[in-house]
Amino acid sequence: MYDYDRFLVQNGTVSLHTTVYPRENAETVVLLHGGPGVPDPMFELAAELHREFQVITFEQRGTGLSSNPDSSYTIEDYISDIDAIAAHFQLEDFHLFGHSWGGLYAQIYAAERPSRIKSLFLCSPSSGTNELWKRTEREVMHFNKKMASNWEWMKMGWYSLLGMLGSDRAYQKVFFLVMSNYHKEYPNINVNEEQLKSVKAAPINKTRASIVRYKPLEKMSAPPFKVCLTYGSQDIYGESQQSVSDRYPSTTSIIIDGSGHIPWLHQPSAFGKILQEFYALGHFS
């Protein structure tokens, strides 16, 4: 792994635990992890992109080591967090990469701050806000029911109920089962249980409510930045994927054969080639 620095970036009362893989005189890629409320350092992805870019990752508000004492999780808050990261590192513009919920977060930010975006990479993104978010939740539920045993499915339901009532530990158990389902077809990949100890109920519950309340995203027929859209052939999202394709009609969705929801783990070579082409990585290994 490359050298990195860690910072606490302030945004009002919020402290964002931020990791920077520095590269002098290089453009910057900001990575947005999934969830919400589930930290993911995306080490493998950061290492690949750091070959030619400065890479910035941060644990979203209230997640992991990022504090949120006021427990505010509006979409406007999330937009302001990226603004704070950009201001702290004096970034006028940057590349934005989002995975899963982070892919929806990236779409929201790019719609509100298009002049700041050099490129937008949407990796298995959640399909949309408002009613479309509810639809994708049903798709994810269907996927997990299909992959789980009856006993696992019962436990997911019970732990989810406790999580909605505010139990961090219950959501940690939910996401252990969820991640186990995501990797079930890839037996060489283990769930990072240590990482899941940082899962918290407040950002999950309150962010979800904010996403449902937020306005539907508008179509971007000719975005002022290039867009890459990828899904795994065995992804957690179903027909709602088409909504993202419709939002960016000038972009062709790339389906990664044999991959689930996390392509840099499930099909690293195929996904690496997509990164290489999109970001013009000169020495992909």
Image (cartoon, rainbow, N blue to C red):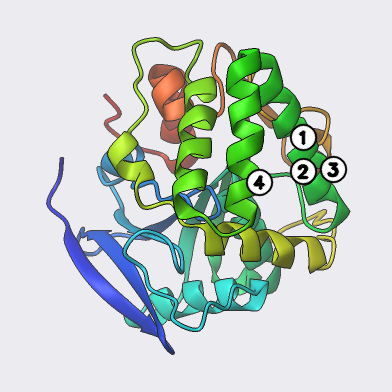
Q: Nearer the viewer, mark 1 or mark 3?
A: 1
Q: Which mark is residue 244?
A: 2
Q: Residues within 10 Å of mark 3 (few under 14, many from 20)?
A: some
Q: Position of residue 80 (x, y in %)?
A: 54, 79
> What is the CA distance from the residue labelled 2 to the residue labelled 1?
6 Å
Residue denoted by label 3: 246
Q: Nearer the viewer, mark 4 or mark 3?
A: 4
Residue denoted by label 4: 161
Q: Amino acid at mark 1?
A: Gln
Residue 280 is left or right of residue 285, and the answer is right
Q: Residues within 10 Å of mark 4 (few under 14, many from 20)?
A: some
> What is the CA distance from the residue labelled 2 to the residue labelled 4?
30 Å
Residue denoted by label 1: 241
The residue tagged with tag 2: helix, strand or loop? helix
Q: Are marks 2 and 1 in contact (CB under 8 Å)?
A: yes
The earlier-in-sequence mark between 4 and 1 is 4
The earlier-in-sequence mark between 2 and 4 is 4
> What is the CA distance from the residue labelled 4 to the residue labelled 1?
27 Å
Q: Residues within 10 Å of mark 2 (few under 14, many from 20)?
A: many
